Image: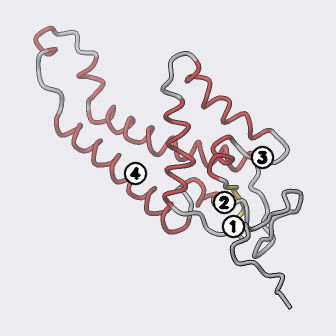
Amino acid sequence: MASEYNPYEAPTFDEGAEPEREQQLTLATRGSRLAATLIDGVLLMGAPFALGIYMGFSSYAVSVDPSQVAAAPPTTAILVVGLLSLLLLAVQCYLLVTSAQSIGKRLLGIRIVNARDGSPTSFGRIVLMRFVPIQLASLFPLVGSFVPLVDSLLIFRQDSRCLHDHIAGTIVVKVE
């Protein structure tokens, strides 16, 4: 008698069924996701900018003395701000690799996971699927400026997932 099992048959998936998850996951709130994004933005752009102002970029940029315009910018300030930016980026990458959390997400107790089964999401998926497509689409003239806005506004749908979440197949959940 022939067996019903066919090792060459394509796997089936019931799209109407809820995916199985190892544990019950609670979606992160829209507010916590927004706050985490703001924290990350302030850290990655605001901190180096503020340090640059403190170290003298502003006095160089608004110099009214024509003889100062040709002078070299404060190289120490450029070096320190550049190193701070690289350090913050390295910390963000380390946290994304080890825990699928940015600094802001870690502070607010949320992280990125695979939407299908709740498993940890890889760094490659986070960068290549969540970040790069939106950034590339935003480079297109005219429509590109609306892509990040549409991406962000999709969080107000019932499933609270942005466009980058759908592209990468991820969700943002509370850390238990």
Dot 4 corresponds to which residue?
Answer: 89
Question: Regarding mark 4 in the picture, which secondary structure is present there?
Answer: helix
CA separation in Å, label 3 and label 1:
17 Å
CA separation in Å, label 2 and label 3:
14 Å
- Which residue is located at x 63 percent, y 59 percent? 112
Q: Earlier in the sequence, mark 3 or mark 1?
A: 3
Q: Residue furthest front?
A: 1
Which amino acid does the dot numbered 2 rest on?
A: Ile
Left or right placement of residue 34 versus residue 137 in this view: right
Q: Earlier in the sequence, mark 2 or mark 3?
A: 2
**Image coords of residue 132 (percent x, y):** 50, 42
The quarter of the picture where the N terminus appears is: bottom right
Left or right placement of residue 7 versus residue 78 in this view: right
Q: Earlier in the sequence, mark 4 or mark 1?
A: 4
**Image coords of residue 145 (percent x, y):** 56, 22
Near mark 3 (Cα within 10 A), the count class, few <14, some 14-19 or many ≥20, is: some
| 132 vs 65: above or below | below
**Image coords of residue 75 (percent x, y):** 16, 36
Q: Earlier in the sequence, mark 2 or mark 4?
A: 4
- Which residue is located at x 75 percent, y 78 percent? 6
Question: Regarding mark 3 in the picture, which secondary structure is present there?
Answer: loop
- Which residue is located at x 73 percent, y 46 percent? 161
Dot 1 corresponds to which residue?
Answer: 175
Left or right placement of residue 58 versus residue 135 in this view: left
Closer to us: mark 3 or mark 4? 3
Which amino acid does the dot numbered 1 rest on?
A: Val
Closer to us: mark 3 or mark 1? 3
Question: Regarding mark 1 in the picture, which secondary structure is present there?
Answer: loop
